[in-house]
Amino acid sequence: MSLWEYANPTRFMRTSGVLLPWLWGLTGLSLVVGLVWGFFLTPEAENFGSTVKIIYVHVPSALMAINAWLMMLVASLIWLVRRHHVSALAARAAAPIGLTMTLIALVTGAIWGEPMWGTYWAWDPRLTSFLILFLFYLGYMALWEAIENPDAAADLTSVLCMVGSVFALLSRYAVNFWNQGLHQGATMSLDKEENIANVYWLPLVITMVGFGLLFVTLVLVRTRTEIRARRIKALIARERMV
């Protein structure tokens, strides 16, 4: 069985319909376990107090904000190369989710930054690139709405997605590119000296899995909605021609 068979809307709708109940269950379980464990069962940090627990929202949302755009990039490239409509619709469906994740990351980062840095905002390389990524999300969604022809909209938004991917990568690796800036290094790293303390590590991993599952689930739901909306538009257009 070829992976490209799932580019068929009918096949996609049938398969995603089977997967969604399981995905909702796994998403809810992992989020409840991770967030309850992280917020209520972990101790306060010595230098950060209870504010350290914001990592259970900030880190997963920031990770998904970046990965959502990268997923949109892959889907957009598939559209440009293979012209599979499901991939274009999946990219469009992911944009509002990625926008929301980016906004959550910016807000929680500001809440963390005020007691840690003495300010809600600083023009730090990672913060600035994240803000630009947020604006790219807005521009991507606006471009979809501004163009009536769906194929032309998919083409132009795919190009925009490739340009915005630069800032998605900068958001991820800005701390590595520039040694200056307020933002700390990676919360989770293969380097034991940089990694988060073990007591916070496992609930954070579970929460990150939950956010990842939530993203996949919402993308499937929204892609199914986009497919239904396109089918309705096609039926309406056909009736007008009769």
Image (cartoon, rainbow, N blue to C red):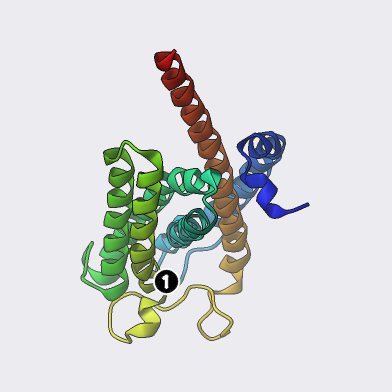
The residue tagged 1 is: 172
Q: Quadrant of the C terminus?
A: top left
- For the point 66% across and 52% down, which residue is it? 4
Residue at (48% x, 20% y) in the render? 235
Residue in the foreground of this view, choosing between 219 and 5: 5
- For residue 41, say whether it is visible: no
- In which image quadrant can residue 124 be found? bottom left
Residue 5 horizontal side relative to residue 121, left or right: right
Direction from residue 57 to residue 21 in the image, left or right: right
| Residue 32 placement (x, y as % from top left) | 60, 45
Amino acid type shown at disc 1: Arg
Above or below: residue 172 compared with residue 161: below
**Local crowd size for mark 1, using a 10 Å CA cut-off: few (<14), some (14–19), many (≥20):** some
Answer left or right for 109 relative to 30.
Answer: left
Give the x, y percent position of residue 8: 63, 41
User: Considering only vertical position in the picture, is 32 above or below 71?
Assistant: above
**In the rendering, at what x and y percent does residue 85 appear?**
52, 44
> Looking at this view, is 135 or 114 the one in front?
135
- Of residue 156 and residue 134, the one placed in the foreground of this image is 156
Provide residue 21's location: percent of width, then percent of height.
68, 35
Regarding mark 1 in the picture, which secondary structure is present there? helix
